[in-house]
Image (tube, rainbow, N blue to C red):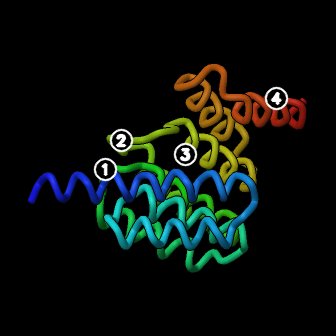
Amino acid sequence: MEEENNIMHDQAMILFERAYRNQMRGQLGDAIELYKRSIATHPTAEAYTFLGWTYSMMDRMDEAIEMCHKAIAIDPDFGNPYNDIGAYLIELGEYEEAAEWLQKATQAQRYQSPQLPHLNLGRIHEANGRFRSALQSYDEALEIDPMFLPGYWAKTALLGKMN
């Protein structure tokens, strides 16, 4: 039984990787179908999260958020879907709710890009005129990854605004 589960997981990951390549080439319809096949083969938090990201690229934010909730249900320790929900809510102008999700993302135990929720929190602070808090968030992102260019660009742009 465990060997069969491992085989299904491996097949799902092959489909996931194909989906991701399609997504990066802008072939979003194909990516969606491959992510769905991956999920049908063996559901993973990654496949649901990236399916949600694909939906967000098509401005289908409600579906994107729904996929992130499914990812969290599978693996509550995976940080990406918490950040993604926060980012989608920022796009919808729902800053307060977004900040709650981003705070959860900063606490996640398993995260591919832990600097992202700090950048997104900085975006919320900046949008609300809390520039010092925004700088602190950008600095936290850069502390995690000193080569994180979006964090550097956001901080530099904000410092320019403040002068």
**Are the two marked residues, 2 and 1, in contact with CB atoms closer than 8 angstroms?**
yes
Mark 2 or 3: the one toward you = 2
Give the residue drawn at x 52%, y 53%.
83
Give the residue drawn at x 66%, y 77%.
60
Q: Label 2: how many residues lie within 10 Å, few (<14), some (14-19) or many (20+)?
A: some
Q: Mark 4 — residue?
A: 156
- In the image, 17 versus 50, the foreground residue is 17
Label 4, label 2: how far apart the Cα atoms are: 29 Å
Say which element carries label 2. loop
Q: Mark 2 — residue?
A: 110
Residue 39 in the image: state x and y as whole percent: 39, 68
Quarter of the figure that contains the C terminus: top right
Type of the residue with mark 1: Asp
* Vertical order, 8 against 110 (above or below): below
Mark 4 or 1: the one toward you = 1
Label 3, label 1: how far apart the Cα atoms are: 15 Å
